[in-house]
Amino acid sequence: MSTNPPDLRPDLAPRARIADTPRPGQPTIGMVSLGCPKALVDSERILTRLRAEGYAISPDYAGADAVIVNTCGFLDSAKAESLQAIGEALAENGRVIVTGCLGAEPDYITGAHPSVLAVTGPHQYEQVLDAVHGAVPPDPDPFVDLLPASGVKLTPRHYSYLKISEGCNHKCRFCIIPDMRGRLASRPAHAVVREAEKLVEAGVRELLVISQDTSAYGVDLKHATDRGHRAHITDLARDLGQLGAWVRLHYVYPYPHVRDLIPLMAEGLVLPYLDIPFQHAHPDTLRRMARPAAAAKTLDEIAAWRRDCPDIALRSTFIVGYPGETEAEFQTLLDWLDAAQLDRVGCFQYENVAGARSNALPDHVPEEVKQDRWTRFMEKAQAISEAKLAAKVGQRLPVIVDEVDEDGIATCRTQADAPEIDGCLFIDDGAEGLAPGDIVTVTVDEAGAYDLWGRLDD
């Protein structure tokens, strides 16, 4: 059992979990999925298509006829991690197909690894399948190779990511996601709801709604109604809330209409949880980022959300050391964090990314200053988290069980905790009869900086 570290990266998906036993002679594809939950969903879609064609899925390089590496290109450090993963796959297996965000720069990949079999960009599912067919022809057995109704999932059975759109219409100077994934392209609401229904029918107890800009869902569709479902985030959240699973909203920009989601949280239809990428608080820094510069108004919004839904948990990510950030601007961010009292916080040190407009900005911050500001920011965030969790001691909270280890210790999450990126609640005694996906009530006995400990209610 371990507690969450304060430097947990907020851009990463949970580790992909694959449980598939191939039949004798079955063509087998390995999968390495890097980056964010949106990339993990892409991996699930690719593997679902391959599984339907008779391929087995391998969790490692050694047992596979070829390996797909789904890459991340969000930061230069993530690009380096992707290149390293490709190199490991080539060394261990030798037959590697590359896809994902870094695949938008094929020359960058082939320059480092010229022996890869193919390179495709993000959500280019057909091209990935073509590359797999060329490397490892399918050989399905229609009497044996049956696909689960929910498709192939890389997360535990009891929770699933639900991607509602691709792309983004924002033009933040530090981000190249719109260049890699394009402008906002929302899925029809009826298709999202149908997928969610199938997931719940298959045993999913928690739906994690993701996109690049969840608040903007349906804007490109002019919020059209189709088959009884309207493509608007408020309507979609209400529809999903009828399915009987926890519904958690990620990547919600603080547009004014977000306040319409809060009553759904107060009613219990949607979890009282908002993941909002504020990024900074000083108006000048936000303008250099090309983001809305209304930090004071944001504090008013936060106060209104908490007034209407006192149990709401707020998580966000921030960038420190952005080009031109002065000590005074950074101090404004610390003061804002004091005022906002966010529940869960992640933080990046700014990095140049090839193709980002922020690279050309003047007054880049020295690395040692970035590190110092990151440390000071996380110290304040940790102190806020510790005080907030201490206030939960003695409270009765519903939790969802993620796993129970061989010693009978259950790792759970409260409604304020998303998988991997937030905290945990541990039950040290009497949890032997619990199973992943169970939702139970606990009384909180102890609090740390990021995690809680509790006991099952009688």
Image: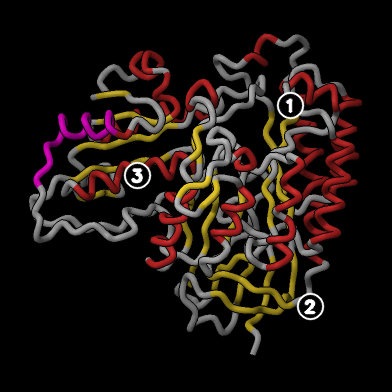
Question: Which quadrant: the C terminus?
Answer: bottom right
Marks 2, 3: nearer the viewer: 3
Provide residue 124's location: percent of width, then percent of height. Answer: 35, 30
The numbered dot on residue 458 is none
Please provide the residue range marked out in magenta. 126-139
Name the amino acid type tagged 3.
Arg
Which residue is rendered at x = 71% and y = 44% of the image?
A: 316
The numbered dot on residue 394 is 2
423 vs 331, left or right, is left
Q: Are marks 3 and 1 in contact (CB under 8 Å)?
A: no
Using the rendered view, name the quadrant where residue 306 is placed.
Answer: bottom right
Using the rendered view, name the quadrant where residue 24 is placed.
Answer: bottom left
Measured Cα–Cα span from mark 2 to mark 1? 40 Å
Marks 2, 1: nearer the viewer: 1
Name the amino acid type tagged 1.
Arg
Badge 3 or badge 1: first in the primary sequence:
3
Looking at the picture, does residue 412 appear above or below residue 348?
below
Q: Secondary structure at mark 3?
A: helix
Badge 2 or badge 1: first in the primary sequence:
1
Badge 1 is on which residue?
291
Given residues 452 and 57, the one toward you in this image is 57
Measured Cα–Cα span from mark 2 to mark 3? 43 Å
Q: Secondary structure at mark 2?
A: loop
Mark 1 crowdedness (10 Å alpha carbons): few <14, some 14-19, many ≥20 = some
